[in-house]
Image: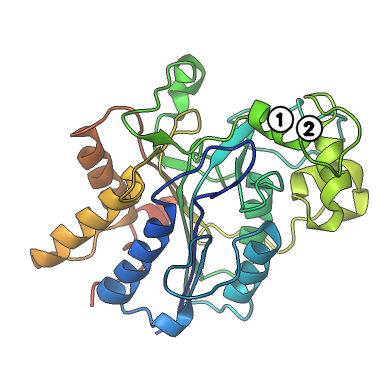
Amino acid sequence: MGTKKALLVGINYRGASGINELNGCCNDARRLSNVLMNFYGFEGTDIDILVDEPADGERDLPTHANIHKYLKKLIDGAQSGDTLVFSFSGHGGRVKIGSLGEDHSQDTDYDNTGYNEMICPYDHTNVLTDDDLREIVSGIPAGVNFTVISDSCNSGGLIDEMVEQVGGAELKYEEELRVSEGSGGSKRLTEDMLISSLNNDDRISDPVDDSNIGRVLYDLYKDDSSLTFKCRFNQDAYSRAGSKSDDVGILLSACESWEFSTDTADGGVFTVALESVLEELRSAGESSPTYRQLIMAVRGKIEEVSESQHPCLYCSDTNADALFVGEFV
């Protein structure tokens, strides 16, 4: 049996400037920790939790640099048969390819959504994008199960070049204007919010707009910036280390790439539904679900209360019908 390890991130952005505070994201990280330990036999010592409201003790804050540091810890030494989980609950967003300022011939975005999807660390202007997640996945050895769970807005397509197994990719261009924030708070960071935050940053002297945002983000964060920006302004940064394997990388997204993900005080609607489905199956003595079965059941549970978000599954054909992080214990 391989090693089971996890990195679980939850960010409520208390006191952040230019971005909406959230309420249940730290709860999401703790909830998933309990699921992995109680349902799947993960050891607590093999689970790192990064939250910005450390009610259960001091932890490193979930900054861009710390998320990268702990992701490196998660995947370093990974071998075939290992199960790795990375979850993120917090603000997400997307920017249109080509609206990032100066173009670069080695644009890393090869997916078919037409956007760079992103998640927002505690230092929320220093985003991580679908390119960053793709580079991480590409560096993981074949035979490793690397599951990403993202409870954030626009989370569909958060890993570049992944096959959408469950979702409405063929509808996105017709449907992307039909979005709803649902009954709770939206975990959405728009490009306008990002620009506004940068214009209020004392470290930046010149005005920021959609013509120079990419350059500004790279100049501000340099080697700590997203690959999306580094590859445009530093040719040496371009990298897709390792070889893609169809059994590495599984994304469970809270919604389609054009939809919002709903936050409540208890937690994200997606994460709460995921826990509920697994708890009901286990309590009934059922087997652990496959990734496809799980995401379809979570979709059904969310549709009982809201039609504002539709969770998706991105992975290989083989992994779609593999058990979600293994057997119940």
Which element carries disc 2, helix, strand or loop? helix
- The answer to which of 168 and 218 lies nearer the viewer is 218
| Kind of residue at badge 2 | Asn
Which element carries disc 1, helix, strand or loop? helix
The answer to whether residue 141 is left or right of residue 222 is: left
The answer to whether residue 158 is left or right of residue 279 is: right
The structure residue drawn at horizontal position 64% and vertical position 52%, both measured from the top left corner, is 134
Residue 45, quarter of the rendered image: bottom left
The structure residue drawn at horizontal position 53% and vertical position 57%, both measured from the top left corner, is 246
* Tag 2–tag 1 contact (CB < 8 Å): yes
Evaluate whether residue 34 shows in this view: yes
Q: Which mark is residue 130?
A: none
Q: Which residue is mark 2?
A: 199
The structure residue drawn at horizontal position 39% and vertical position 23%, both measured from the top left corner, is 180
Q: Quadrant of the N terminus?
A: bottom left
Image height check: is 37 above or below 165? below
| Kind of residue at badge 1 | Ser
Question: Farthest residue in the front direction?
Answer: 15
Please provide percent x and percent y for residue 319: 41, 57
The structure residue drawn at horizontal position 24% and vertical position 59%, both measured from the top left corner, is 289
- The answer to which of 44 and 327 lies nearer the viewer is 44
Please provide percent x and percent y for residue 205: 91, 35
Please provide percent x and percent y for residue 190: 60, 30
Q: Which residue is mark 1?
A: 196
Please provide percent x and percent y for residue 203: 86, 44
